[in-house]
Image (cartoon, rainbow, N blue to C red):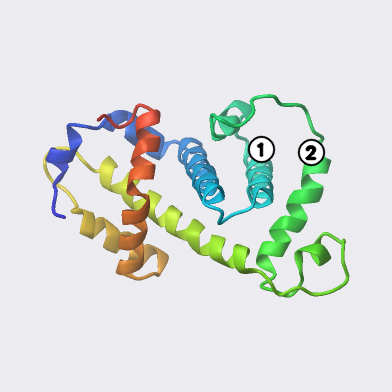
Amino acid sequence: MTQNRKSRSKDLELEALKAVKDDLEAPEIFRMSQRIEYYEELRTQGELPTTFIALEALSMLMGGHEKGHSKEAISSAWPRDWDEETFEVPKRVIAALVIPWLNYKELEAEKSLGQVFGLEPSLSTSRKTITSMKVKDQHLSLANEVELNYLAAGTKGKGSTLETVIEAVATANNVSFETVKNAHKTHKERIRNGLRSLGLLKG
């Protein structure tokens, strides 16, 4: 694909997109929304349990809060079809779930989930979900990086081709061109639908 900036800029709210890309909060909230949406899709396909999504959502909630994001900004990342009924929970309660969960994801099969949470003594090496989701998360992140950089560059009729952007993202993340290309192909429409819902992409 060798589409230049001019031909893709007519469908974009370029200034708004650049503002989102440059804002310290907006890109992270957008990526959070994309991850949750993707997880929900995998859940409906039977590839991911609800408990995984719940623990990841709690991790995002606590992480976003610690980075200073507002409750409104964080909640905007939740899918619209999630139950809107909410209630206050002490941070300590959430941390008791999130901290062992984050530790479990980093342990590389040294301990089972039950061991990390202090619920069982025996080792379980069944970590297929965690391993798989690390790869899926990385691919979604790569696709977001490609799409936002490619679209945000679209002005004045000059600029990088999609292939050039993919190459740059691959180099920056020390992965292959094909890995990034395939990730972008898989998630391009998901990301663009997300941008459309924010009014940043027309059509």
C-beta proximity under 8 Å, tags 1 and 2: yes
Residue drawn at 33 percent across, 52 percent down? 146
Q: Residue 112 is drawn in which quadrant?
A: bottom right
Looking at the image, residue 152 sits to the left or right of residue 33; the answer is: left
SS under mark 1: helix
> Is 40 situated above or below 126?
above
**Quadrant of the drawing holding the C terminus:** top left
The residue beneath circle 1 is: 65
The amino acid type found where label 2 is placed reads: Lys
Percent x, y for residue 175? 39, 69
SS under mark 2: helix
Looking at the image, residue 4 sits to the left or right of residue 191; the answer is: left
Residue drawn at 54 percent across, 48 percent down? 39
Percent x, y for residue 108? 66, 72
> Is 182 situated above or below 143?
below
Percent x, y for residue 180? 34, 62
> Is 179 situated above or below 37?
below
Pointer 1 local density, CA inside 10 Å: few below 14, some 14–19, many at least 20: some
Q: Earlier in the sequence, mark 1 or mark 2?
A: 1
Q: Nearer the viewer, residue 108 or 82?
A: 82
Residue drawn at 66 percent across, 66 percent down? 106
Percent x, y for residue 126? 68, 71
The residue beneath circle 2 is: 91
Count of numbered circles on the image: 2
* Disc on res. 135: none
Residue drawn at 18 percent across, 53 percent down? 161
**Quadrant of the drawing holding the N terminus:** bottom left
Q: Residue 17 is drawn in which quadrant?
A: top left
User: Alpha-carbon distance for marks 1 and 2?
Assistant: 10 Å
